[in-house]
Image (cartoon, coloured by chain):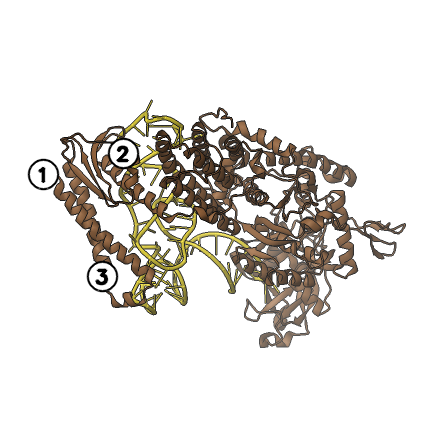
Amino acid sequence: MTTPELPTQYTPADVETRSYERWVSEGLFRADPGSSREPYTIVLPPPNVTGVLHIGHALDHSIQDALTRRARMRGHEALWLPGMDHAGIATQNVVERELAKQGLSRHDLGREAFVEKVWEWKDESGGRILGQMRKLGDGVDWSRERFTMDEGLSRAVQTIFKRLFDDGLIYRAERIINWCPRCLTALSDIEVEHSEDEGELVSIRYGSGDSEIVVATTRAETMLGDTAVAVHPDDERYAHLIGTMVELPLTGRSIPVVADEHVDPAFGTGAVKVTPAHDPNDFEIGRRHSLPSITIMDERGVITAHGPFQGLDRFEARPAVVAALRAEGRIVTEKRPYLHSVGHCSRCKTVVEPRLSLQWFVNVTPLAKAAGDAVRDGRTRIHPPELAKRYFDWVDDMHDWCISRQLWWGHRIPVWYGPAGEVVCVGPDEQPPAGYVQDADVLDTWFSSALWPFSTLGWPERTAELSKFYPTSVLVTGYDILFFWVARMMMFGLYAMDGQPPFRVVALHGMVRDQHGKKMSKSFGNVVDPLDWVERFGADATRFTLLRGANPGSDVAISEEWAAGSRNFCNKIWNATRFALMNGAAVGSLEDADLTAADRWILSRLQSVVAATDAAFDEFEFAKVSDLLYHFAWDEVCDWYLELAKIQLSQGLDHTRLVLGHVFDALLRLLHPLVPFATEELWRAVTGGESVVVAPWPVVDERYADPSAEAEILALQELVTEVRRFRSDQGLKPGQKVAARLSLSGTAIAAHEVAIRSLLKLEQPAESFASTASLVVAGVTVEIDTAGTIDVAAERKRLEKDLAVAQKEAAQVAAKLGNEQFMSKAPDAVVVKVRARAEQAAEDIVRLEAQLKALPAG
RNA sequence: GGGCGGUUAGCUCAGCGGUAGAGCACUCGCCUUACAAGCGAGGGGUCACUGGUUCGAACCCAGUACCGCCCACCA
């Protein structure tokens, strides 16, 4: 094996691009549907094609890459399928903003030219994202990259639309929908974000004299479209008015008073103004009472009702209407500020206006039922389970899904209308009848995203990919799109794939936040650009930082200090491996090696770390995986084994090279899913293998479990640490050699005298050795000659403090052992432990008293 | 209004019934021939509060107080 010259400091940039291009060109990430290996599939949640990857994507991708890489190493045919989403409304907005800079609107270009423009934008922006993914090291199968508006995926969209339409699960209806007056499109319920906003609640007197009735509203301008006042049927205050007409101020119209169960008599005055065209509840009341709907606003929220308010924006009209009412003495009370929940467009934050319009809907009832059942019966497991409840709450009470959008960018609705308004839904292979006109609208972008797990594998064709890789193994995504995306993939996947859910496990992660747990936002200036970190700390360190905080379902707080810490870890691994190589580490059989306790200890520890790593990986506990490997590598391998190995090598124990080779081979493989680049470079150097990407995952080997070696090294560590403490307290310089006598015979670490003396810089004493301090640890007495320089007062203080602790411990433990109830009820293992503590405390007391006594006077 | 989660060292978090942990930050000493992005030794916590269960509670139960998130047709 050749020992390449590795630089003394890890410089990520040197190795990252080199490795990545090689991985791709050698096809290591390619998945073969014809393989006989068990499949492992993850579809990448497709990022928005117009965006750039943010640190949240980096987390999402790091997790998926770690899972896929480990699965591949474990012998699975691993597919991580990449792609991007056309993100209808978001993308259209971005391109429109660009046009606006040139003073143009999409209407200036016309539909065709505008869509052309968006495609151009998509090519440019999408390319940027692909570059970012390469920089992060995403091990995706590039040969299978997809885009939600690809020909194949468009075909899938039309196919499922047609199927749902034929099954009666897609319908067109005039309903109150959420309308964004800025984006000029309908929105689904979940595209509306609610916030507590300040408003004004005004009470308005309708009618007069005996027919007077007071209603309250926060949207005064809508009174122009009122067509009734509703009261509860049992409300005696208004019983005499039910069925009568009252005068509607400002309009010269009279409207009926109707009785409706929906009204809460205890709220406000118990009377509600009814505006069927501009409020979803009122629409329902209107329907129950056959009330007319009067639309008073256009699609931009401008008042169209004839009169003095015509042409005013809704927010100008509101105070104007109130002022006019006040002038007529119609205002009874005004409450301001009045906090109430207001819906905003999740894209542009404009206040949403409920609007009566003709739209396409999915009847979700049967689909949502199936989506709930699949999780309930365990076909799909949601992880962490706490979040499953959220899923059920939503799926069990889902409203029909408004899928039409008045946009130009997206999948055009595959429905044509005849001259007399006849409707025909056309599948992908059909021709619309002559003279029919296609619906102008496009589908909600989440409609095509919902097909992602199977449309990307070739559905509706029965492809080899589909039968090999569907259902996918795990879906990794943030809990924020549980409803938007996960639930809808479940619905459509179960529907299209004959009851087979799209994934076996949904592994939800949290949001990335700053070091104080604050949300990242541009205005706050705490946004981390993953590429910036990749440049400064390396992709490995960036990924490791994110994974170290990634507990299932919980948010990840990160900071630059942590990224630096992760980079330091990579550097540590780099240098440790470099050291092993410099000392001839090699992979070979350990069968005939005469292993020392230190060797057996590290091998024993290694096999239990493999087991613990597997357990944590299986539960998506990435923070735990990272923590385990971090501490094993740093605290055990580097801090202890390498130091002991140095001594063994100087003693000529050549098999140490094989142990080093074995440990680093395994450690680098374990770390590879988290830290792909550094491990690739190092693993190749250690083993001479082609690529760690396709190296087998370490397996637990019980034969290496060695409790007695572990106990032995633990005792060694205790002794060394205690003597180091003494040296430090006494101000002995680390390099300064000190004479000492060791009484090792009969102790567990009798064989380690050379190591102990070497680690602690203890020399053999001269003939006339007079000890000035003695320490007793792990059954060993260390008598140290410090040539009279010992600080007696400091050591006495220290010993007295330790003695006090030991005495307190002894008292506590004695109390426990004297407690009958404890003795009779505590499990044996606990009693044994407590007894051991009692013995230890007693020993400590004797030892410390002796040490105190042995101190020279001073 | 309904639901869920949190409150442990200065900061971010792990631990979830048997002697309080990690990373970073802090103090002291070290360029010890893999690594100063490092090495060694330390300091620091009535585990939010109040009750209860238990031989034993950071951990289980009840309540309180803050904090966060999700859902909701609060006129």
Q: Residue A392: x and y, percent?
A: 59, 61
* Residue depth check, mark 3 versus mark 2: number of the one nearer the observer: 2
Q: Is residue A427 above or below residue A853?
A: below
- Within 10 Å of the Cα at label 1, are there few (<14), some (14-19), or many (20+) other Cα atoms? few
Quadrant containing the C terminus of chain A is top left
Asked whether disc 3 touches disc 2, contact meaning CB atoms under 8 Å apart, the reply is: no
For label 3, the residue is A815
Viewer can see residue A301: no
Q: Colour of chain B?
A: yellow
**Residue nearer the viewer, A318 or A106:** A106
What residue did someone put label 2 on? A757
Closer-to-camera residue (A15/A456): A15
Question: Between disc 2 and disc 1, whose residue precedes?
Answer: 2
Residue nearest the viewer, comparing A243 with A520: A520
Q: Are marks 3 and 2 on the same chain?
A: yes
Q: Position of residue A721 (x, y in %)?
A: 28, 40
| Chain under numbered label 2 | A
Judged left or right of residue A531, residue A304 is: right
- Is A791 placed above or below A166 here? above
Q: Is residue A743 visible?
A: yes
Q: SS of the residue at dot 1?
A: loop
At label 1, which amino acid type do we have? Ala
Q: Earlier in the sequence, mark 3 or mark 1?
A: 3
Q: Secondary structure at mark 2?
A: helix
The residue where tag 1 is placed is A857
Residue A629: image quadrant is top left
